[in-house]
Image (cartoon, coloured by chain):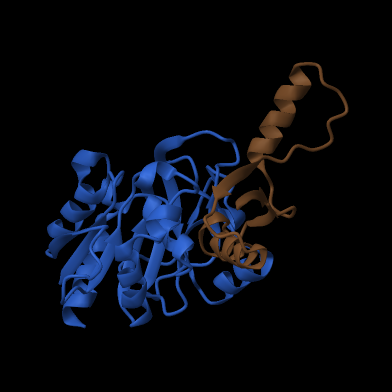
């Protein structure tokens, strides 16, 4: 089963890279960009096919390694 | 006094740290990241600067989950002393032994220069030989040294005297100018500046030497 994990900085945390991208887009002439946040996408291909088990495992992976929950939040798409 | 210096793939300050400890009279053993146990009889473990595992995923994230780090965490939980410098500080926050996290510098630039630090707390074995409020010049060299923690954590660190050093002129956006923090039992210090890079005048300054001398002295007589 495939799983996709999105890791983003928490909204309360300033994202300097997103800010730099926002400035670069503005310098290219794109107008009206109010905010840019940059994150990570992590794709996993798992041998397990039980949805509940995959969900629990991926959540544990996020908590223990894929995200630093001090500054990052995560979400996942499974299947 | 016996110090262990952990070496990860991509560590590049392990030798400097070893030299700093040896200069202060300590006996140093290098510890490889794949080892699952620590040499017996260590008084302190130091996690060096560098780019462990190429900074993949997040700085220090992979190193913090390496086999040796399980032993390092157990060592700390048993009351052992730890020093993490630069990437070592990032590793210690990733293990959860120190609060907060180190993010990309606010100006997005790699900053490499001597900076002025203020000693904020001297009630610990690392900074006991400095004076509170003393100014030190210590080099920094990092891209991800922007210390971040929530307001409650920062207030607690300040209230408990667990901010060891602050920057006099904030080079990276760190909250409350924090350059180094201590664990609750004050036996774990993480700092972005490199005290091991200023231990003799030939390096442009020797303000870091007292940290190693104090440690060796304190842990030898403990």
Quarter of the rendering occupied by the C terminus of chain B? bottom left
Residue positioned 60% across, 74% down in the render: B156
In the figure, the shade used to draw chain A is brown
Residue B167 on image: x %, y %: 50, 51
Residue B73 on image: x %, y %: 37, 72
Residue positioned 27% across, 43% down in the render: B12
In the figure, the shade used to draw chain B is blue
Residue positioned 41% across, 58% down in the render: B91
Residue B199, can we see it? no
Residue positioned 15% across, 70% down in the render: B2
- Towards the viewer: B190 or B88: B88
Residue A33, can we see it? yes
Residue at the outermost front position = A49
Q: Quadrant of residue A62?
A: bottom right
Q: From the viewer's perspective, is B220 left or right of B118? A: left
Quarter of the rendering occupied by the N terminus of chain B? bottom left
Q: From the viewer's perspective, is B3 left or right of A60? A: left
């Amino acid at each position: 089963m495939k799983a996709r994990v999105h890791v983003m900085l928490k909204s309360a945390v300033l994202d300097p890279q997103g800010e730099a991208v926002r400035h670069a887009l503005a310098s290219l002439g794109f107008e009206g960009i109010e905010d840019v946040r940059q994150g990570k996408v992590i794709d996993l291909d798992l041998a397990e096919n039980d949805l509940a088990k995959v969900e629990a495992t991926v959540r544990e992976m996020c908590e223990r390694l894929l995200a630093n929950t001090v500054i990052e939040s995560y979400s996942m798409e499974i299947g | 006094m016996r110090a262990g210096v952990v070496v990860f793939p991509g560590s590049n300050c392990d030798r400097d740290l070893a030299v700093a400890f040896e200069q202060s009279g300590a006996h140093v053993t290098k510890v490889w990241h794949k080892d699952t146990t620590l040499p017996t009889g260590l008084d302190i473990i130091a996690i060096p600067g560098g780019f462990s595992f190429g900074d993949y995923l997040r700085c220090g994230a992979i190193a913090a989950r390496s086999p040796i780090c399980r032993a390092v965490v157990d060592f700390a939980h048993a009351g052992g002393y730890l020093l993490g410098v630069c990437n070592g500080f990032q590793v210690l926050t990733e293990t959860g032994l120190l609060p907060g996290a180190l993010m990309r510098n606010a100006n997005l630039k790699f900053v490499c220069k001597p900076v002025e630090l203020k000693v904020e707390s001297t009630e610990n074995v690392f900074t006991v030989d400095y004076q509170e409020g003393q100014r030190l010049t210590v080099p920094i060299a990092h891209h991800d040294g922007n210390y971040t923690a929530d307001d409650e954590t920062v207030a607690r660190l300040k209230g408990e005297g667990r901010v060891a050093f602050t920057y006099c002129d904030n080079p990276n956006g760190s909250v409350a100018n924090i350059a180094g923090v201590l664990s609750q039992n004050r036996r774990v210090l993480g700092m972005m500046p490199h005290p091991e890079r200023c231990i003799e005048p030939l390096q442009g300054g020797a303000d870091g030497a007292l940290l190693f001398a104090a440690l060796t002295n304190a842990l030898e007589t403990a």
